[in-house]
Image: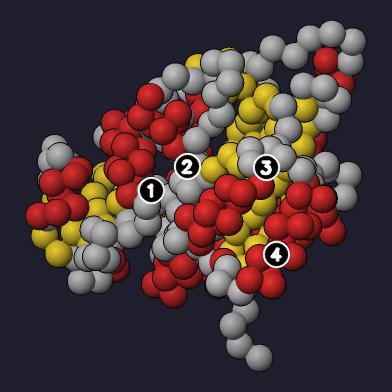
Amino acid sequence: MSRTRVVLLFGGVSSEHEISIRSATSVLAAFDRDRYEPVLVGIARDGTWRTGALDRDLTDLVAHGDVVGDLRSLRPDVVFPVLHGPHGEDGTMQGLLEIAGVAYVGSGVLASALCMDKVAQKHVIASAAPQIPLVPWRSVDGRRLGDEAYVADVTADIEAELGLPCFVKPANLGSSVGVEKVTRIDGLLEALRRSASFDHTIVVERGIDAREIEVAVLGDGGPDTLASAPGEIVLPAGVWYDYETKYVKDVATLAIPAVLDGIGAAQQIAAIRDSALAAFRVTGCHGLARVDFLLDRTSGTAYLNELNTMPGFTSISMYPKLIAHAGIPYPELIDRLCALGQARHRERGALRHDL
């Protein structure tokens, strides 16, 4: 029986390049080599695609591997794009793979783009699934931060409608890159400018005292789609979940499942899982997503924070750990994702293209 040939794409041109390499290292180790034939393709920061031997250090492969001129020359049965952030998780890579006519793991063009753009995502959730609470927010045009009148209006609106503290973040990045907590109104403009260096669209959200709750979703959106038990990212007092907390200081611990107790805990857990599934479906996600919530410590409200269509797969990542807790070990997770990607490709291939 021939093995399934899987091209593992990693690296990329975004600020999440290193995280992608860490994710790809874990995915590569999980492949059942009796069933799968992995092919490594690393994308350098300058956009060059390179390949090399499976035992090669992935960072070295990205820098010095053999150049790939055409993905199709590698004859993939399915592509696993373990790419985070812009030009990987935002629909651009998915569009390229659609044009190339190859099967791939994860959501399609629209869902990937929608879930990467936090502003568009919030608009769709508010319209299509109004039962899911969202933290009060507003968007800011980073290209207009030199306009004093615009800045004055934005500052006044944020102070009046959102209050302090608030969180400022680029609309189209992940891994908490560029996210800042603002506690003084005179620090808002500089935070907005730093965020605008990553993306022209900025999201500002009301700061709430919240627990970081996450749900892993696996499936095609149909009745058999799995929503895991909620997990929690537990942080020391006074610490919030930024890039340095996640990947440098490593001070967070994971509680799987999250400890939700008291009267109504079972109903609260069920509501969070239902919200995760509803968000997955209304945004058109496929294959996988990690759905993040902010659980208000005072009110108990579970606010939807965001959906990640290609969550981290590193050794410390929540998504594979939540799926494992649901009874699906890492190798089986990889197997299911590849199968879902191939099934979706066959379904799309059956659609008519003639008149």
Q: Nearer the viewer, mark 3 or mark 4?
A: 4
Query: Of marks 4 and 2, which one's residue comes earlier in the chain?
Result: 4
Please name the residue that numbered disc 2 is placed on. Answer: 175
Q: Tell me if residue 346 can be seen.
A: no
Give the Cα separation between the discs numbered 3 and 1: 24 Å
Looking at the rendered structure, the secondary structure element under dot 3 is strand
Give the Cα separation between the discs numbered 3 and 4: 17 Å
What is the three-letter code of the residue carrying label 3?
Cys
Looking at the rendered structure, the secondary structure element under dot 2 is loop
Looking at the rendered structure, the secondary structure element under dot 4 is helix
Query: Of marks 2 and 3, which one's residue comes earlier in the chain?
Result: 3
Give the Cα separation between the discs numbered 4 and 1: 33 Å
What is the three-letter code of the residue carrying label 4?
Ala
Please name the residue that numbered disc 1 is placed on. Answer: 16
Q: Confirm or deny contact between disc 3 and disc 1 (CB under 8 A).
A: no
Q: Nearer the viewer, mark 3 or mark 1?
A: 3
Give the Cα separation between the discs numbered 2 and 3: 18 Å
Query: Of marks 1 and 2, which one's residue comes earlier in the chain?
Result: 1
Query: Of marks 3 and 4, which one's residue comes earlier in the chain?
Result: 4
Q: Nearer the viewer, mark 4 or mark 1?
A: 4
Most foreground residue, 207 or 58 = 207
Q: Confirm or deny contact between disc 4 and disc 1 (CB under 8 A).
A: no
Give the Cα separation between the discs numbered 1 and 2: 7 Å
| Residue at (64% x, 28% y) in the render | 212
Most foreground residue, 222 or 145 = 145
Looking at the rendered structure, the secondary structure element under dot 1 is loop
Determine which quarter of the picture holds residue 14.
Answer: bottom left
Q: Residues within 10 Å of mark 1 (few under 14, many from 20)?
A: many
Q: Is residue 232 left or right of residue 329?
A: right
Please name the residue that numbered disc 3 is placed on. Answer: 166
Farthest residue toward the top? 262
